[in-house]
Amino acid sequence: MHLPVTGTARGIRRATHAHGAGESGLGKLIELHGVNGAGDVMITVALASTVFFSVPTDEARGRVALYLAITMAPFTLLAPVIGPLLDRIPHGRRAAMAGAMLARALLALVLSGAVVTGGLELYPAALGVLVSSKAYGVVRSAVVPRLLPPSFSLVKANSRVTLGGLLATGIAAPIGAGLQQIGPRWPLYGAFALFVTGMFLSFRLPPKVDSAKGEDVALLAADERHLHGPHRAAEKRPGLRTVGPAVTHALGANASIRCLTGFLIFFLAFLLREHPMTGQNAAVSLGIVGVAAGAGNALGTAVGAWLRSRAPEIIIVTVVACVVGAAILAAAFFGTVLVACLAAIAGFAQALAKLSLDALIQRDVPELVRTSAFARSETLLQMAWVLGGAIGIAMPLIGTLGLAVGAAIVATGWLTTVRGLIRSARQGDTGRTRVA
């Protein structure tokens, strides 16, 4: 038994440490992110079985709405604080990531009791898991620029980290489902073990992760007046006011896709439970849509690394337009195949648009504020997901109507950002050096 285990471990290590990622420390971050994704999916399996699948549809809708109200609503208030708070501890990023892992490990033990007793501690514990997970994500985004191998662009590095997380999630999901068959506590015990492992892996990252040389705090603004306004010299702290409109337009477009993703997750979860795909039960129907979305996300990540985001504005405009078209088509001719296709296209677009946003931040944001920019953009995208999920919960279970609302969400984001992104791309083609 020793050989298969060590052989698999060596194969994973070769893959994650290839092309200079081992020397720079990026390979260790990829492995840490894989453990993080596996732990998160274990908790998701346990909570979904408790909150969603264990009760009738009407009661499940009320319980999920309560879950959102108790966990997501406070998160929308805490999320804007996460970025600024982490800005204040740039010298302790490894400790912050380890702390987020340890917090989720302990909360997984709390949840392991709550899923059996149905106690109210489930909701604050779930909120703590959510906040800790997003805090990890913000710090991870800020860490990546410090671990770039010499031949890597930021988009390529993020692609590797994201693919590592997706692969680990795909492996952990069926394991979590199997543990759920043993008992509702067991996926949470698995999450505890994974997060404890992640805590130790956090401290294995290179010491340069904790370096804050040349960094400062970033704020969000988009117009030329704030770029060189009369109060610029008086500001004590620089912000995203130094980057121009491209990043904020790209962030707006990404927010619309993230909002659509949150909407589809909750809306389709209830819709397919009430009206499963032809010849399938609710669990299989949800699994088909989930696999389609995951496959689209993985493909978008791979394509993003291949394209190297040489024209990130055009990529964002194109993929969001594709999502708009797919959503309109699915709303007009609602059916099983089109719903699965929409999930796949939305997953593909979310991955590719996010990688393009990363490329824009690398290209346009000065190094002085780049780390903080990642933290703040990630926080805003998570808030958009929460908003979309809330809309999905409130919608009546009418497929055509729901997908029409989804199309309207992403179309609004596309229409409000397309002109600015195209203008930025044209200006960049003539007068700006791009980062491949």
Image (cartoon, grey):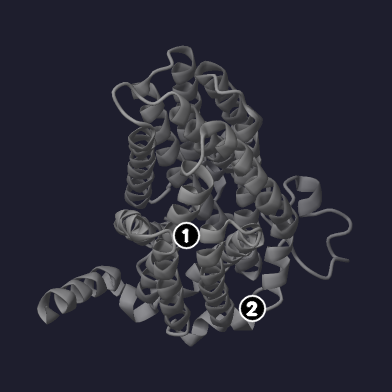
Q: Residue furthest front?
A: 117
Residue 256 shows in the view:
no
Measuring 50% from the left and 53% from the top, which residue is drawn there?
Answer: 47
State the mark number for residue 90: 2
Q: Which residue is mark 1?
A: 43
User: With 217 as the anchor, is 277 left or right in this view?
Assistant: left
Measuring 54% from the left and 63% from the top, which residue is drawn there?
Answer: 137
- As measured in the structure, the alpha-carbon distance from the residue carrying label 1 to the one carrying label 2 is 29 Å
Q: Secondary structure at mark 1?
A: helix
Specify the quadrant that holds the N terminus. bottom left
* Location of residue 333 with respect to 304 vertically, above or below: above
Residue 404: name its quadrant: top right
Measuring 38% from the left and 40% from the top, which residue is drawn there?
Answer: 290
* Location of residue 39 with respect to 296 vertically, above or below: below
Residue 293 position within the rendered picture, expressed as x and y whole percent measured from the top left: 39, 40
Residue 85 position within the rendered picture, expressed as x and y whole percent measured from the top left: 72, 70
Between disc 1 and disc 2, whose residue precedes? 1
User: With 370 as the anchor, is 277 left or right in this view?
Assistant: left
**Which amino acid type is shown beneath numbered disc 1?**
Ile
